[in-house]
Image: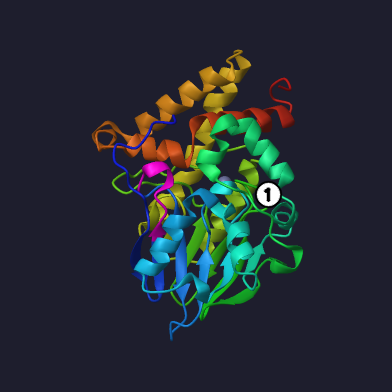
Amino acid sequence: MWEAAPGTFAGGTATRVDERIWAIDLGFQGWDQVVYAYLLASPDGGELALIETGPAATLPALRAGIAAAGFDIAQLTKIFVSHIHLDHSGGAGVIVREQPDVRVFVHPIGAPHLIDPARLVNSAARLYGDRMDALWGEVVLVPEDRVVSLSDAETLDAAGHVLSVLFTPGHASHHVAYWEPELGAVFTGDVGGVRMPGADFALPPAPPPDLAPDDWVVSTDRLRQTGPRRLYLTHGGPIDDVSEHLDQLMPNLAAAEDICREAMLAGADDAEVTELLQTHTEGRIGAAVTELPGIVQRYGWASPSFLSALGFRRLLARRGEIPKP
Ligand SMILES: [Zn+2]
């Protein structure tokens, strides 16, 4: 974990992935493909919306990506976030501080944490310690009157695109995915898992505090029921073999849970469980693929094994299956 990228990829590339949609690679921690934001433009190019911002630390890459796509961030009117984990929405506050007309759309449970990020920052600081700043940058509040709480199944305009809101708990209780019916695409945030180009393995990130596999199963079915031809993952980019991807996601989550339960019942500590999960993940990525430079590291940056170990420990303790930590 925390392995530096071999190159110095600064991010800021924009790939046109659909009609008036670009995937902006944020170059998270020097790695490509690990964290994306999606840029949506109106037919006349005059209005922009973002799905995800990435952390504040990668805002220079976000701005460069918007420019590379041929636009100016000053045209941005709306930000839609999948959830409030800092790799997805950490940059929203800084953007709104600079462009006070921008509104941020978020699940109602997530909204208070954008308005007052103190608790979010404290819990992240417990996990990341002195790496906080390098990972996430400055976490700035979004003024209350700029935050819009979403309703499930509502339909919204996003720079001329239609976005239908899918409440999709499991990875986090306040997780939302966005379905674009005209394109047949879902922007999945983390509920669609992590999948790096070149690999087949769909990794469900399982962090604390409110990991809920039963809810996640229902949410995965919900993604499936929209009948998408494509998923836009925040971690890894577009996925076109949608059924194969979604079909393995929940079995993979269950397998990781079983590994954690068995190890924790046998008294394994967090470091030992992390090691077991990491070994399992590398095995599932597969020997042929793990030789691709950086693929294991990319999965690790998108979904660190130590974080999933903590997530499963909290889940299993909450269910009374293991002693409280
Ligand atoms: Zn997350």
Q: For the point 41% across and 71% down, which residue is it?
A: 21
238 sits left or right of 153 in the view: left
Q: Tell me the element at label 1.
A: loop
Q: Is residue 49 above or below residue 166?
A: below
From which residue to which does the magenta span run?
24-32
Toward which corner of the image does residue 66 lie, by quadrant?
bottom left
Coloring basis for residues: rainbow
Q: For the point 47% across and 83% down, which residue is it?
A: 46
Task: Tell me the kind of residue under disc 1.
Answer: Ser
In the rendering, at what x and y percent does residue 70 appear? 36, 74
Q: Is residue 216 above or below residue 319?
A: below
In the rendering, at what x and y percent does residue 178 appear? 55, 65
Q: For the point 43% across and 86% down, which residue is it?
A: 44
Q: For the point 57% across and 37% down, which residue is it?
A: 132
Is residue 323 rendered magenta in the image?
no
List the single residue furthest toward the front: 98
Instruction: Name the one closer to the observer, 235 or 27.
Output: 27
* Mark 1 beta carbon near ligand 1 (under 8 Å): no
Q: Is residue 105 above or below residue 279?
A: below
Residue 22 visible in this rendered orientation of the protein: yes
Q: Report crowding for label 1: few under 14, some 14 to 19, many 20 or more residues within 10 A (C-alpha).
A: some
Instruction: Name the one closer to the observer, 106 or 214.
Output: 106
List the single residue furthest toward the bottom: 44
Residue named by callout 1: 173
In the rendering, at what x and y percent does residue 319 appear? 72, 31
Is residue 31 rendered magenta in the image?
yes
Toward which corner of the image does residue 129 lie, by quadrant?
top right
Q: Quadrant of the N terminus?
A: top left
Residue 229 visible in this rendered orientation of the protein: no
